[in-house]
Image (cartoon, coloured by chain):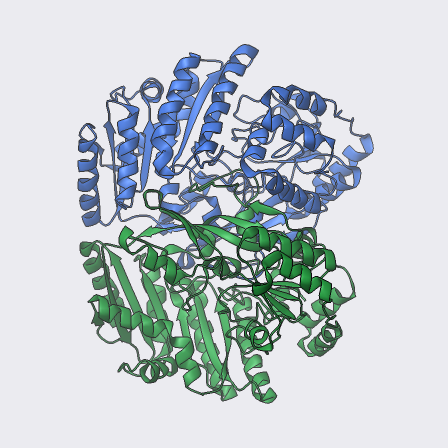
Chain colours: A blue, B green
Amino acid sequence: MFRGRLNHVILAAARYPHRLNELHTAQAAQKIVPLTDSLVQNLQKIVGDKNVSEAMAIREQHGKDESYHACAPPQVVAFAESVEQVSGVAKLCNEHRVPLVPFGSGTGLEGGINAIRGGICLDLMKMDKILAVHPEDFDCQVESGVTRKTLNNYLRDTGLWFPIDPGADASLCGMCSTSASGTNAVRYGTMRENVMNMEVVLADGRVIHTAGKDRRTKKTSAGYNLTNLFVGSEGTLGIITKATLRLHGIPEASVSAVCSFESIQEAVDTTVQVLQCGIPMARIEFLDEVSIDACNKYSKMNMKVAPSLFLEFSGSPKSLDDNAEIVGEIVKMNGGSDFKWATDVDERNLLWKTRHDILYACMALRPGCKPYSTDVCVPVSNLPRVVVESKKYIDEAGVVGPMVGHVGDGNFHVFFPVDQSNPDEVKTVHDVSVKMALLAQELNGTCTGEHGIGLGKRELLIREIGESGIEVMQQLKQTLDPNGILNPGKVFF
Amino acid sequence: MFRGRLNHVILAAARYPHRLNELHTAQAAQKIVPLTDSLVQNLQKIVGDKNVSEAMAIREQHGKDESYHACAPPQVVAFAESVEQVSGVAKLCNEHRVPLVPFGSGTGLEGGINAIRGGICLDLMKMDKILAVHPEDFDCQVESGVTRKTLNNYLRDTGLWFPIDPGADASLCGMCSTSASGTNAVRYGTMRENVMNMEVVLADGRVIHTAGKDRRTKKTSAGYNLTNLFVGSEGTLGIITKATLRLHGIPEASVSAVCSFESIQEAVDTTVQVLQCGIPMARIEFLDEVSIDACNKYSKMNMKVAPSLFLEFSGSPKSLDDNAEIVGEIVKMNGGSDFKWATDVDERNLLWKTRHDILYACMALRPGCKPYSTDVCVPVSNLPRVVVESKKYIDEAGVVGPMVGHVGDGNFHVFFPVDQSNPDEVKTVHDVSVKMALLAQELNGTCTGEHGIGLGKRELLIREIGESGIEVMQQLKQTLDPNGILNPGKVFF
């Protein structure tokens, strides 16, 4: 597979973007074969009649995520209620060489669940049990359909929480699959650091526990790290049916603040200096003036329309004061405004809800548009250059491109609202996005810090990892999914 | 390979320990074939004449680590000076189906580098350059032969350090290979959380960068997580020639203390309660009375011979006082002594040097003996039971077994000094060690938190991960090393 003709086209496409059309034509040539009645009947036997749907509305709902990628409906949607059913469906698909696309909350941003080669979409949201919480060990186990908000509501009285928050109320196993992160990653890490074990159904129906059944230790050196092989594999290596997650104590005290700057450069310089001083920030988020404007309109806020930082400090009350004082001085040195504090819980929640709703706020700038998102990440010292240059690209192209980011991790996004029906506009935005990713890659960075590769960044992945590294990834895919049934066309072509 | 006869024997052996002899007999039947002159000449061409040795002293020095496992010398030792040489040697070995064992500092504890199937040992310690330090980004890049102490000396004036400390002055790429951790893991995580990228030579000589060349971002969602597939793979999937590591700011202030308890139960209960209160400990180490006695003798200390905790607090001076006060109260509630503080740098360094030298201190209890180490890890709530039961096993068997541990992670060790020439003694110790590992596995734990599988825990790995999980690991091995040349006989049989 990985030394064949298609691969050459892909590598060529990565080096010479104008040849991408050749690639897309090659892909489109792969026809979707109609499913036989007997296959659908077998599917019904496995998950039950009521759990299989061929209705167009259901299929369309399962054929797209929150991105601009065109809806690609699966041929049939099945709803699984147990790991045995997931295993049965995998076996069936593997035997008949039918594409199988796992589906969670559908809140991805790179077309990860679009069924571009048809097949069966397996919706996992009915498997929604919180199986165990061990407050004394700071861990829990959930089924694939439990979302992060559901878990955190459930944990409310324990003093614990699961801090990874990609914005959307995503399913936790979907978050494993994408290696999600979000505003709290600067403090708590990403999914990679917070998943201890997973139950995974392989392409041939085998069920494994990546760290062994029922194991939930803080560390292990026992064999290969299968957990982190499946985290971030975007449904292409296996279907995650259970996850054992680390929990964290809710900090004793937290305060949040907003401050604004004259320029993007100053806001980003402030971030870099705060990190270099070793201040343990709970959150440090950047929003440019376009994003602030979008937030003001969508969330009915009244913030100064200027490049801004949203900050959060947490810990013991004493340490909060110390850290806030130092950060306040750095902000001032960079010409920033005084902090506008959000101290009580309601005010703080409103601030972060505003930040979390930003994707929707950006889309509301141009009703009817869908988000084309970029998601680059660079070493923090290269962040000012990438952010400032990116802003130039956006302005030069004359498109609407609000910038927001988890700048504490060197990670930021542009959520371009695009009119999908206008190919010129999509192309213009795509070109800006690719230029940003190429610049990030030039500066020791990655084309995706947290959204994943999905459909949108397959060429960029090749450029990023290099030919030999991609070969290894494709060998692993080939080994675990020799018939290529699992979420085909994602991550790789 | 993974459905063959040997595999059945292995699985049977895991279930029925009395059948292990059958397995060991099957293994011994694999003969070591003499290397041809032309192969050795080719090896000399690749690395240079001066970098190849067949002298018995050199071979024996490279045939064992610090564990009790019998020396298994390679047939020849080569010293690599560049990644091109490593790649050349891999190609040569792959073509001629000759075992290839990468060698770092030789400080492992599970026989990971013993050349049980002969072949070429490739010593990587001449590749000892610190290639880059980016203080503003908190990262650095090192070649395979740089040790943790060398790196930390080099970093001295930057205010940064690399905190992972397995005790020995191990090579950093060796630490990647074993997924090492140590006393600071409770605060900074293990190697898994602190390696950002690696250059790896594959069995066929291909060179990959696990996250793409020159990339050093705090997070990424770009493709499969190859970095963490190779971290902890113990030289069986590839040879690590460079590592990009996360650095951390040296804390503003640190204080250490020792306190002693009437019983093991009380010391371990204290640990669990401290963690459950969410106190951010820098270190929390347990030593039983046998270990304290060993330390007093070896490091000329004068500590009370009783189960003890070594603690470290670090952060801002204010937070130290707060945290130390809360921990002091928990200690008192559990009947512990007042803290004996080590506040100045020299005193603190002496305390932690004592802790780090513990393996040697334990061995000095019985001069001439080698360490048989166990390394179990469980969820912290199960720690008191495992520690107390383990102590019973040791006492019942009538062996010397000092217990020490990174109890903040639920991880602890027994370093049994064993007389290798006495098979009965080795068997007695082995039986205790296996009983401890089985108990840990019963209680949601692992048979190794940080030492790895190596030669010593291959049966236990099968029991821990389960048949399907082991199959997947073996499939990955087969894919990346189809001729089985890389460190054969380690991790799996």
Looking at the picture, does residue A76 appear above or below residue B294?
above
Could you tell me which quadrant the N terminus of chain B lies in? bottom right
Q: Splitting the image into 4 quarters, where does residue A300 fall?
A: top left
Please tell me whether residue A28 is drawn above or below residue A470 in the rendered image.
Answer: above
Report the front residue among A130 and B274: B274
Identity of the residue drawn at 29% across and 56% down: B156
Q: Residue A481: horizontal and vertical position, in percent?
A: 70, 43
The outermost residue toward the front is: B49
- Who is closer to the viewer here, B429 or B93? B93
Q: Quadrant of the C terminus of chain B?
A: bottom right
Q: Is residue A243 visible?
A: no
At which x and y percent is residue B232?
A: 54, 58
Q: Nearer the viewer, residue A278 or A37?
A: A278
Report which quarter residue A311 is drawn in. Answer: top left
In this image, B210 relative to B300: left or right? Answer: right
Q: Is residue A371 above or below residue A188?
A: above
The image position of residue B268, as x and y in percent, is 37, 71
Q: Position of residue B396 (x, y in %)?
A: 50, 87
Choose top left, top right, bottom left or bottom right for residue B363: bottom left
- Residue A239 visible, this orientation: yes
